[in-house]
Image (tube, coloured by chain):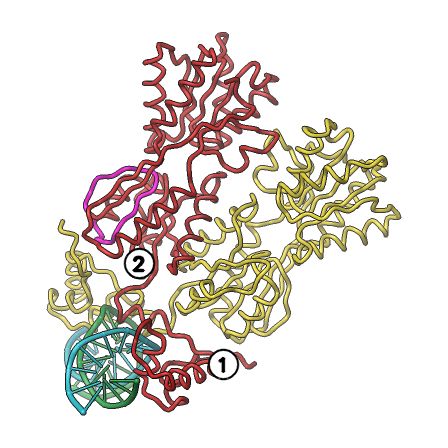
Chain colours: A red, B yellow, C green, D cyan
Amino acid sequence: MAGERRRATAVDVARLAGVSQSAVSRCFTEGASVSAETRGRVLEAARRLSYRPNAIARSLTTRRTNLIGVVMGDLDGPFQPYLFETLTRGLASRGRQPLLVRGDPADALDGTAMAALDYQVDAVVVTAGSVSPAAVRGLMALGVPLLLYGRAVEADGVDSICCDNPLGARLVAQALVAAGHRRIAYLGGRPTAFSEQERGSAFRAALAELGVPLIAVGEGDYSYDSGHRETLRLLAGPDRPDALFCGNDAMAFGALDAARTALGLRVPEDLSIVGFDDVPMAGWPSFSLTTIRNPVDEIVAMLLDMLERRLADPDAPPVLHRPPPLLVRRGSARL
Amino acid sequence: MAGERRRATAVDVARLAGVSQSAVSRCFTEGASVSAETRGRVLEAARRLSYRPNAIARSLTTRRTNLIGVVMGDLDGPFQPYLFETLTRGLASRGRQPLLVRGDPADALDGTAMAALDYQVDAVVVTAGSVSPAAVRGLMALGVPLLLYGRAVEADGVDSICCDNPLGARLVAQALVAAGHRRIAYLGGRPTAFSEQERGSAFRAALAELGVPLIAVGEGDYSYDSGHRETLRLLAGPDRPDALFCGNDAMAFGALDAARTALGLRVPEDLSIVGFDDVPMAGWPSFSLTTIRNPVDEIVAMLLDMLERRLADPDAPPVLHRPPPLLVRRGSARL
DNA sequence: CTGAAAGCGCTTACAG
DNA sequence: CTGAAAGCGCTTACAG
């Protein structure tokens, strides 16, 4: 196999099969009319030449690329990889190619990120916390269908899906209070994140309604390290909390390690810790984290449906879905 | 903002700027000759129309897409996401777009995976354990430059880079024996994986050379769950091992949890556990895993250089790099 | 059912 | 430096 320099084109196949190039094209387009005999000869010639239609050329003529821009931030926590995995597999199984667009929660999209959009993606899906609100506005101005995961935005041609964060926070507040906790602390994620804003304020509101004060608040950035660091700080004072709700699982893991290993506390006897997301690791025996399940599979499935719908009709009215999360009781909280 | 249905093309810009379409094109191509005045008018018109060259059309004419196929498997362990993250960022920073190709270690690449290659990727990089050897051969037959990470293959036009697994395994064997361990067990990963074959056989060989027997062997699949399960089995017998080398960190975490939580053993007093990869989590206090550092950053940097070189000269002789790993001593092993 | 031809939006010799 | 034109590899009316 000399690794032929040039791939075969439809013209090559046509020549070999003794038909027109149009006939070749028809054999590779759904529902085009070709006689059985022609199709047979074309397919055989194509096979011999290892011919496959050039998707770039096809995209140029059809003005559809089948490429979906996927805006994502760092894959550095345990949650993002799972989401990304599920999303890209789902896309592929529906015959769409995910083209990566690297975001940065702090910035608008830079040039190298925007370059991906020059490939004429049919739509772009923005994943949780991957970019700033300003970047989302920039994307909206592009006139490309936008699907937002993890934040709610009201605009034409923009569909959003976002776990019901307020409900999740409320479930935690209620369970904690019902179990008798009265010295409750909250460890928030990146303050600019939509999820953090919803979770933080709903948690406060729910506690207030229940007549239980929030006695301490930490400010993390959704990372393990920030969870570890802030927990050390929150537990340093004299009036130590008896429960800590963390804005995501990664911080909760940091909190667990800080409480148990660094401070020598017993969890959940001395301190209840609750996370948010329910990543696979939350079930590992070393963590056994009580947490709120962010229904990723369900969210991705809905997102894919929203995408098909939007692709079929760019002018369809925007939709916003808020799938409900669930409290998962494990060993890290006395509930 | 009515979300204009049609993006501006070079012809639109040319009309607005009062120049030819060729002139517009030249303003967007590196090193083309355009007068300062023309360039100014074109750029201004382009700005007003939010014009950016259509990368699909450009790809068709230049026969270069700047798209790099990235073949990857599941992102379900802690190692793959970090690798993927580093690789795709590196690609993007060099102006190349990563196009995902989903692999499956057990299968050849299926149709939906191959569909990505119809986009005329300039090269494909295959990441560790993402596909079967048969799939790699299929990719080689395509005549597209191939870069292999995590396995060594000798062939024209195929470059490989792969951590020096035998060295890593030897480092572990030597350190364990030097520290006095004499009842050593090995927990392997997926038997069909290139890395497993190298690590497993080098570990055996090194122990044999040192005159220390391998008293037990487990067969996992690189997952946390398999590490947990196999460790329970390995530690069940009467002549319990005093050291366990795991084929990757994920299994080592499972082993740690099994030993400590399920079996109530002390690590490293009762049992030394060593992993392979040094994922970020290995440094978390709950694990404090002694492990072999797989130099991902270095590997990705080399991979990107290999890519540029291969793109510049498709006929360059194939290269094979084997960067050395490093033993990282933490708390999970008595060394 | 089939072929000739136009056109998708660019780049790049080729003349000037 | 600049424009007219060919060509990249397809799809899709349009005639037949």
Please tell me in which quadrant of the rendered image residue B235 appears.
Answer: top right
Q: Between marks 2 and 1, how big is the CA–CA gap?
A: 30 Å
Comparing A51 with B277, the one in front is: A51
Name which residue type carries label 2: Val
Q: Is A252 one of the magenta-colored residues?
A: no
What range is drawn magenta here? A141-156
* Dot 2 or dot 1, earlier in sequence: 1
Q: Secondary structure at mark 2?
A: loop
Q: How many marks?
A: 2
**Residue B222 point in image, percent of width and height:** 64, 47
Q: Nearer the viewer, mark 2 or mark 1?
A: 2
Q: Which label was assigned to residue B169?
A: none
**Residue A274 point in image, percent of width and height:** 48, 24
Going by the image, does B167 lie left or right of B111? right
Q: Give the crowd class for mark 1: few <14, some 14-19, many >=20 residues within 10 Å.
A: few
* Up-down relation of residue B39 to residue B301 (above or below): below
Q: Residue at x 59, y 21 (%)?
A: A260
Q: Residue at x 49, y 53 (%)?
A: B87
Chain under numbered label 2: A
* Up-down relation of residue A156 to residue C13 (above or below): above
Chain under numbered label 1: A
User: Residue at label 2?
Assistant: A121
Q: Is A144 one of the magenta-colored residues?
A: yes
Q: Which label was assigned to residue A4?
A: 1
**Residue A212 point in image, percent of width and height:** 38, 10
Q: Give the crowd class for mark 2: few <14, some 14-19, many >=20 residues within 10 Å.
A: many
User: Split into 4 quadrants, where in the image is the C terminus of chain B?
Assistant: top right
Q: Main secondary structure of the magenta part?
A: loop
Comparing B37 with B302, the one in front is: B302
Looking at the image, the residue that sits furthest to the right is B211
Name which residue type carries label 1: Glu
**Residue A7 point in image, percent of width and height:** 43, 79
